[in-house]
Amino acid sequence: MKSYSIGIDMGATSIKLGLVDASQTIVNRKNIPVDHYQSPEEFFSAVERTVRNIFEESAVCAEDISGIGIGLPGCVDSVNGVVRDLTNMQGWRGENIPIAATIRERLGISIRIDNDVNIMTIAEWHIGAGKGCKNLICCTLGTGVGGGLVLDGKLYRGSTLTAGEIGHIPLFYMGEPCNCGNRGCLERYVGNAAIVARTLCILQERPNEGLIIRQLIESEDKQLTPKIIFDAAQKGDSVACEIFRTTGEYIGVIFSGLVNTLNPEKIVVGGGVANAGNLVFDPIRETVSRYAMPVATEKLQIVPATLGDDAGIHGAALYGSGHDV
Ligand SMILES: [Zn+2]
């Protein structure tokens, strides 16, 4: 009886692994720090070792596992189980790495891989904020801005498996240059680095404003982070509130285009900036109701993701055991 699955969530700072039972509860979890997977070979060894460790601790074996899923932060060929490019991982660049075949061979368990945002989308769609939706958009806001699409009850990957790149939709024609080689992308305006840079710029331009942010920067080793901007906004700092409002408006403009094009029931928003709650959700919702077609927003809900940091493990486990359609 295959009553368990394993979800593996590879991030830029650690890999999270979880043994998930039939009720979608994570019954054993492990972390692999980033210095243990600097190359694909180290990754394979670390994953194999950790999965065998989980088996031993939880008294399960390969025959009990319906499948393993892995979410990876980059460009993934989910059909062939190959990683094309993990942009933020040194030592992984520019190779076609046969992740699925190698792990399958080492552990003797069926395995499927996809990019981390599709995996998060599967989790929120099956057991999170998007449960029961037939048409759903998931968006993650953080260092990068990612998107996943469920259309007509299926995860939509596009003709060359790159669908959902919400972060690289142009917000401003001929705007700021982006890491992707283009200009004016949404990520360039609402990613963590952009939010911090915009805040610093305003603080410099207006020396008499943002007093709470300035105090917090002083007390936190003079390093401005999105968390400080959030804390300052909670305390009513005018510059911090303005930053979240503008960020929400930028996101709302792009969402309006997506709503007009795809007519979803829900947009689920997760990641660091989404933790700012109504500070960012209010301007997103207001902008979408202003810019999207009224008929397209009749049933639309824009809601926070509910699975938090565990979405990666849950989504990967669901996907590994065949829950993607
Ligand atoms: Zn871009």
Image (tube, rainbow, N blue to C red):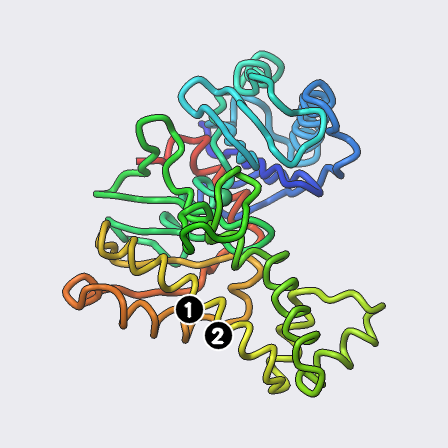
Would you say the beta carbon of the disc 2 residue lies within 8 angstroms of ligand 1? no
The relative height of residue 143 versus residue 235 in the rendered view (above or below) is above
Element under disc 2:
helix
Give the residue number, with chain letter if any, for mark 2.
245
Q: What residue is shown at x 43% (from left), y 34% (from top)?
A: 319
Residue for point 30% across, 65% down: 301
Check the image and report above or below for 163 versus 63. Answer: below
Query: Relative to 269, does residue 220 appear above or below in the rendering?
Result: below
Q: Nearer the viewer, residue 37 or 110?
A: 37
Q: Residue 275 placed where, x, y %?
A: 55, 66
Could you say which disc has been placed on residue 249 in the image? 1
On the question of residue 287 being in view, the answer is: yes
| Quadrant for the C terminus in the image | top left
The percent position of residue 56, horizontal first and vertical second, equals 69, 29
Residue 74 pos. (x, y %): 54, 34
**Near-viewer residue (101 or 171):** 171
Query: Residue at (53%, 72%) from the top-left corner?
Result: 244
Extreme residue toward the front, this view: 174
Q: Position of residue 103 (x, y in %)?
A: 59, 18
Disc marking residue 319: none
Q: Residues within 10 Å of mark 2 (few under 14, many from 20)?
A: some
Q: Are marks 2 and 1 in contact (CB under 8 Å)?
A: yes
Q: Is residue 219 left or right of residue 121?
A: right
Please state which amino acid type lies under the numbered disc 1.
Glu
Residue 104 higher or lower than 275, as above or below:
above
Quarter of the rendering containing residue 198: bottom right
Secondary structure under tag 1 reads: helix
Q: Which residue type does callout 2 highlight?
A: Arg
Mark 2–mark 1 distance (CA, rounded to whole Å):
6 Å
Mark 1 Cα shell of 10 Å, populated few (<14), some (14-19), many (≥20): many
Quadrant the N terminus occupies: top left
Which one is in front, 174 or 292?
A: 174
